[in-house]
């Protein structure tokens, strides 16, 4: 074995599989040998499973019983830097390596030969008769110099139905051929002219280009007010990475954002990039995974899981809207894509750009401490100016019963309608009403499987649990006291607000934007495009509308309940409310017409509301940082959440109490354990949930201590334990 990364036939290799096993498995290298990192198919019991050659085998048991690798898959081997990334991410999040490998192989059919598709090119015969439609097909093929197209592409180009193309293929005038689906992505040209940048933007773009040319790891916080053109600045960084022959990854927090963004990328580079998210087809996911590994996809635009694609030469990672909570995966492997982006870039010598108008306090603190570079864009692009922001004091408004749009807001929306401008009414609650209450006995309708109230979704005609997804018909009789016709919706959700808006503004065209009201991501993206083109007078939306959308004709934002996020015990409540309100307000006045944002509040004197209205972001972050530092909580301390669950509440609490009594490993690093206590939602899907919180000093070896703490535990029956390092939510 001359090459330390190569194993000859019969050599022992250690294989990591995606099966839930806690160790590497020994196999013999197959005929022809294999390299370290090779994706292989191996026997496991009676099954054949996917694995990766992780290194040399241990050989610590009877060699005659060791089986051979079945075959090496025809895909690019996993690079050493990817192995390192998965290992370090597993150590940080306290996740089994098998689960990390599942994240890195989320593409179906990796071991199968390339699938084929039909393509059509110009044939060498003449059809027996010509029609206008047939002529258009043949002319389209001639215009493109004999290039081949799929049936759909050719039919759309020629403006004919697919049957016309099929008819020509039968006569040989068009040739039908099989072609592999897993083809390289079109070349992106970084030297095409981009938009003319402002002086502010040019300074930012030059700084990022220089950082990428250095070829070294570094993180830059790109902070810019909403509408300042952060995207144009970081696209210049993408162009520089492509010029250097390196790949780039842009992470977006919401699939609905991709349509507009992809259009901008295509305009800048002349072709569309690879698009990785849950809305992509299985065939497309496999193609992207393969092409990224071969270096045939220069740029990937995707959701958080795109971080685990097998990039061959990754030079740049953009995390757009880096503060967004959707970057934290809350089930399965619990990781924060923002933090994992920094880890991956540090391993492969790439630059990270964290872009946001309202950065997370973690990123702000890192920039203040000099760990991150900072670039700021302080003015909106072009003629656009920041919206005027005012509070509507709801204590002085005369509100009719079961009404949520104040007279002041109603009048302002009416004025905008008269000018032909769009308004946005924002409420961060899905469904029709958050509570259904019996007026006879006071009972609130809850989920049968969770300790959560069921939300009425009137367009579905059902109650829905937002924890487990359980639904049931809206009852006519109270399940508790059996009283008839006494059930009433309490409080507003987006559907109820839409109902009020339709009654208040009967002549207005109203569009409702909520993620659960669209059957597919494509339908949601199409609706957002229609609104941007002016196909609505009033937009009613949840936090989905706060994420980077550009509605040029939108000049008014009305926040129905600005106090909503200030309730509860979440240590990030003030930060999230500040970010959300500033982001939502930023949707107004993004073109030539100035915008206004009105916040309905029962406590306009609250420090967070005052900070939002004054625009004193620096003052808010400093005050919030001082408060967190005094409390020793992130980003000035470390935290981890331990959630225990099971169908027997007594067993779950017994386990929690035993852990709290035996916390020596935690106390040895100067940390504290709080709990056990029932989780805020104490039952989900029939499982009782108990939570412990670990609070540690900033430099403490938290993961190592937790590993020692939980190592002796033996979970019996259906008891489960999950560890969330750096928790973002505390439900």
Image: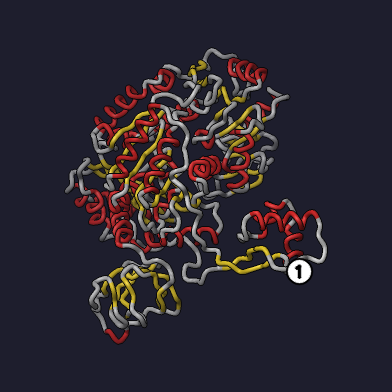
10 Å neighbourhood of mark 1: few (<14), some, or many (≥20)? some
Label 1 sits on residue: 171
Q: Which residue sits at x=73%, y=66%?
A: 173
- Quadrant where the N terminus sits is bottom left
Q: Is residue 105 above or below residue 550?
A: below
- Check the image and report above or below for 187 versus 538: below
Residue 85: quarter of image: bottom left
Q: Position of residue 202 (x, y in %)?
A: 38, 31
Residue 135 falls left or right of residue 210: right
Please provide percent x and percent y for residue 618. Answer: 33, 24
Q: Quadrant of residue 610?
A: top left
Q: Is residue 87 above or below residue 418?
A: below
- Residue at point 29%, 59% (across, down): 84
Q: Position of residue 560 (x, y in %)?
A: 55, 25
For image coordinates 49% across by 59% down, the residue present is 184
- Element type where label 1 sits in the image: loop
Location of residue 356 (image quadrant): top left
Please tell me whether residue 607 is drawn above or below residue 43 in the rendered image: above
């Amino acid at each position: 074995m001359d090459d330390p990364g190569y194993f000859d036939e019969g050599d022992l290799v250690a294989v990591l599989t995606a099966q839930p096993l806690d160790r590497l498995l020994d196999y013999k290298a197959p005929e022809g040998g294999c390299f370290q990192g090779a994706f292989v198919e191996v026997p496991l019991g009676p099954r054949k499973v996917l694995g990766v050659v992780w290194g040399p085998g241990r050989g610590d048991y009877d060699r005659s019983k060791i089986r051979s690798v079945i075959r090496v898959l025809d895909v690019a081997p996993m690079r050493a830097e990817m192995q390192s990334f998965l290992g370090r991410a597993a150590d940080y999040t306290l996740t089994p390596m098998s689960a990390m490998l599942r994240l890195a192989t989320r593409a179906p059919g990796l071991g199968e030969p390339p699938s084929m598709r039909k393509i059509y090119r110009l044939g060498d015969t003449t059809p027996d008769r010509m029609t206008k439609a047939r002529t258009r097909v043949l002319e389209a093929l001639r215009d493109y110099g004999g290039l081949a197209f799929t049936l759909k592409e050719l039919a759309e180009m020629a403006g004919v139905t697919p049957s016309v193309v099929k008819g020509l293929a039968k006569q040989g005038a068009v040739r039908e051929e099989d072609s592999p689906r897993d083809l390289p992505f079109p070349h992106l040209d970084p030297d095409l002219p981009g938009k003319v940048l402002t002086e502010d933007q040019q300074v930012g773009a030059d700084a990022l280009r220089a950082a990428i040319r250095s070829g070294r790891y570094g993180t830059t916080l790109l902070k810019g007010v909403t509408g300042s053109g952060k995207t144009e600045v970081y696209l210049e960084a993408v162009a520089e990475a492509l010029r250097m022959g390196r790949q780039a990854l842009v992470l977006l927090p919401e699939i609905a954002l991709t349509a507009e963004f992809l259009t901008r990328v295509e305009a800048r580079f002349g072709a569309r990039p690879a698009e990785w998210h849950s809305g992509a087809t299985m065939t497309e996911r496999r193609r992207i995974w393969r092409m990224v590994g071969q270096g045939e996809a220069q740029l990937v635009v995707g959701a958080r899981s795109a971080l685990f694609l097998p990039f061959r030469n990754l030079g740049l990672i953009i995390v757009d809207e880096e503060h967004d909570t959707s970057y934290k995966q809350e089930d399965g492997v619990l990781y924060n894509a923002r933090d994992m982006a920094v880890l991956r870039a540090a391993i492969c010598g790439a630059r990270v750009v964290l872009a946001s108008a309202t950065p997370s306090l973690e990123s702000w603190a890192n920039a203040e401490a000099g760990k991150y570079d900072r670039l700021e864009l302080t003015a909106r692009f072009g003629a656009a100016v920041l919206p005027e922001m005012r509070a509507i004091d709801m204590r002085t408004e005369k509100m009719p019963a079961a009404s949520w749009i104040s007279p002041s807001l109603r009048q302002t929306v009416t004025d905008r309608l008269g000018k032909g401008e769009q308004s946005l009414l924002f409420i961060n609650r899905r469904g029709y009403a958050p509570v259904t209450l019996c007026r006879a006995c006071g009972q609130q309708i809850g989920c049968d499987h969770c300790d959560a109230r069921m939300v009425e979704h009137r367009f579905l005609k059902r109650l829905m649990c937002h924890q487990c997804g359980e639904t049931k018909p809206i009852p006519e009789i109270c399940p508790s006291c059996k009283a008839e016709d006494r059930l009433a919706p309490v409080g507003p959700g987006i559907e109820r607000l839409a109902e009020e808006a339709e009654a208040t503004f009967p002549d207005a065209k109203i569009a409702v934007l909520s993620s659960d009201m669209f059957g597919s991501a494509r339908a949601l993206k199409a609706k957002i495009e229609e609104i941007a083109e002016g196909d609505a007078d009033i937009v009613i939306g949840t936090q989905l509308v706060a994420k980077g959308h550009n509605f040029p004709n939108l000049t008014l934002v009305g926040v129905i309940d600005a106090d909503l996020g200030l309730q509860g015990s979440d240590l990030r409540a003030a930060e999230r409310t500040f970010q959300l309100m500033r982001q939502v307000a930023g949707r107004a006045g993004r073109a030539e017409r100035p915008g206004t944002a009105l916040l309905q509040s029962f406590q306009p004197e609250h420090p967070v509301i005052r900070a939002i209205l004054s625009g004193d972001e620096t003052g808010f972050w400093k005050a919030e940082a001082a408060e967190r530092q005094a409390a020793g909580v992130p980003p000035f301390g470390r935290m981890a959440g331990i959630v225990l669950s099971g169908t027997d509440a007594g067993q779950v609490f017994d386990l929690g109490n035993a852990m709290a009594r035996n916390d020596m490993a935690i106390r040895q690093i100067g940390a504290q354990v709080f709990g056990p206590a029932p989780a805020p939602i104490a039952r989900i899907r029939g499982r009782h949930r108990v939570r412990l919180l670990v609070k540690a000093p900033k430099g403490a070896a938290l993961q190592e201590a937790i590993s020692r703490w939980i190592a002796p535990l033996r979970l019996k029956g259906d008891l489960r334990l999950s560890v969330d390092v750096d928790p973002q939510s505390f439900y």
